[in-house]
Image (cartoon, rainbow, N blue to C red):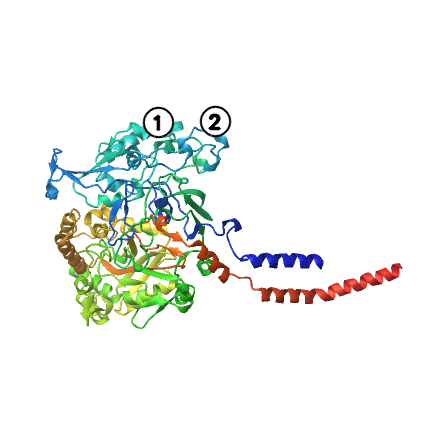
Amino acid sequence: MRYFLVAYLTIVLAGCGSAWNDPYPAADRGKNILYSVFIDRPKHLDPVQSYSENEIAFTAQIYEPPLQYHYLRRPYTPVPATAVEVPRPRYLDAHGRPLPQNADPARIAYTDYVIRIQPGIRYQPHPAFAAPPADLARIDTLADFPLRDTRELVADDYVYEIKRLAHPRLHTPILGLMSDYIVGLSELAAALQKHQKALPPERHDEWLDLRGFPLTGVAVVDRHTYRIRIKGKYPQFIYWLTMPFFAPVPWEADRVHSQPGMAAKNLTLDWYPIGTGPYMLTENNPNARMVLERNPNFRAETYPCEGAPGDAEAGLLEDCGKPLPFIDKVVFTREKEQIPYWNKFLQGYYDASGISSDSFDQAVQVGGAGEVSLTDGMRKRGIRLATSVATSSFYMGFNMLDPVVGGDSERARKLRQAISIAIDQEEYISIFQNGRGIPAQGPIPPGIFGYREGEAGLDKVMYRWVDGRPQRRSAEEAKQLLAAAGYPNGRDAKSGEPLVIYLDTTAGGVGDKSRVDWLNKQFQKIDLQLVVRSTDYNRFQEKIIKGAAQLFYFGWNADYPDPENFMFLLYGGQGKVRHQGENAANYANAEYDRLFEKMRTMDNGPERQAIIDRMQALLSHDAPWVWGFHPKDYTLRHAWVKNRKPTKVGNNTLKYQRIDVALRERLRAEWNRPVLWQAALLLAALLAAALPAWLGHRRRERESARRGG
């Protein structure tokens, strides 16, 4: 009993000084650490291969392309990162002679981008820059290397990474696209493939020193300057210079990580990235925890002093001119389930959170006019809500090669229009998105040049403009279109057979039961039968590639903030079946393609807007997609998190954020105090349960003592 009481009191007293449920080490309390979450484990951290949202959350903090997006300005604006300035394109004719800035795009054979980087930038400490250990067999992690060093960032490091796009053993998702633009890239890829095939089998995995292979379109001008030459005029190339694909990779790191035996131990650039950015990856356990720590060699950079309207009022300019980054360490914990994630956020153990459907009503309330605000419980905790429309589009695509819904006949066109009207996106957003989205009127989302607000941007095939608001056309109007297409009451006018429409989807995606039931009701409104064919991801992708699907759901997040990045999804030259491109609907319209080819090379302005409007009118008429919605991002943050502004385009955002550590410690302690009355009640219950046994034990001891006496 004495031992029990001592142990119990020890636990209680220990809990009085700190929260019992704190998931982090006691040594980390009070430190300048940001706590975040990741759900899907990153697969690639090598910038040449990485292209997913869950990966760029890490790579964007480590690598530094020459350009970045201004953190606060909207619309999104490229600004220098390691570059001295944003390079201005220099236009050349077929003979290499300079052309004026306003030259006809038809005369522009090449565009040069000359990029000058800041001198004195240094890499994070890394074993690649130090003398190698004598025995690599004893090296299992990067931390096992005994020595680390650094060196200055030079122009050749950027050239080396661009050459890696053509590496025969690396699979970059942008090689095909960049080969169409960067002069000599496709030739370099062919030369490297030939070199690889000529190697004996035992040398297939050896380091490929790309410095010995020329790339005609990319050249070092001097130690801190390099030039990229692209074919024709492609204004969007400036946005690519903000992406990790164009970040520097030192040849020394490529060499070290290519040594025999390294890949078997995950000692690769895919596992251990190296960069000049504000943070370096110090712990990589993608099944549980990822840790970024401040790069001690990070260059001098300061917080911006200007932003978008409303930023000053929101406190986003209070740290103007202060050195970056503010946070010393970022701990990412993998959370596979939403409920533990949400509960830990409410306890203050995660600094920010999204809002799942299960937690929506607990966090947010919607007023009668549709205005969104935090619930009283959230406001009492000082939690802040930020909302923004994502630069994303979700849609249902028609396969334009399908004999029923595809093609350019009036019959198929009216069928597509009728289905587009029948699927009530407003209702879908309300039911399945908790109102977090706006119905799309075309492929371009808000925040991207070319998007039209209000009546000017209305798809008049699907909507009317009534009392200053868009109003979806009725099911009766959709039925009239269906009858005009030869399907009165949902039946073929000639055969009398009911029309059956097939939607292909992946298991667990749009194919879950509630969505399927809702979709069936939408089609039933116009007397059509819907069959949902759910399959695994690989089989679904195979159907899309072969053009075997009829209808399908897809989405697109902006690679860069330009209308070309959305309108190209319907460009004939990007057809999935014929050209293995991103046009999964296989839509082809000669007039649209002609306008697209003109629009893609233009600078933003009234003329470009007029062409986009004409392209949108063609899409509205042809209806290759059921315009879905542009999602709204709702994010919550605690009061101690400063300088957090939502963005879907710029990803290197951790360096701007700041934590009020003292406020966090105080509020965490308040929200996670030990409940001592419960402990006392537990002690009383335990004593009550133990007392009879203890008294019996004492009685037996006395009786034994008397008998012994």
Residue 474 location in percent, x, y? 22, 71
**Residue named by callout 1:** 199
Q: Nearer the viewer, residue 186 or 24?
A: 24
Q: Tell me the kind of residue under disc 2.
A: Ala
Which of the two discs, 2 and 1, labels the residue nearer the N terminus? 2
* Location of residue 2 with respect to 235 vertically, above or below: below
Residue 361: x and y, percent? 39, 67
Residue 339 placed where, x, y %?
Answer: 46, 60
Seen at 23% across and 44% down, the residue is 238
Query: Does dot 2 land on a helix, a strand or a loop?
Result: loop
Callout 1 amino acid: Leu
Q: Give me the C-alpha separation between circle 2 and circle 1.
A: 27 Å
Say which residue label 2 marks: 134
Q: Position of residue 659 (x, y in %)?
A: 41, 53
Q: Quadrant of the N terminus?
A: bottom right
The number of numbered discs placed on residues in the rendered structure image is 2
Q: Secondary structure at mark 1?
A: loop
Q: Are marks 2 and 1 in contact (CB under 8 Å)?
A: no
Is 611 on the left or on the right of 272, as rendered? left
Please tell me in which quadrant of the rendered image residue 392 appears.
Answer: bottom left
Asked whether residue 580 is in view, the answer is no
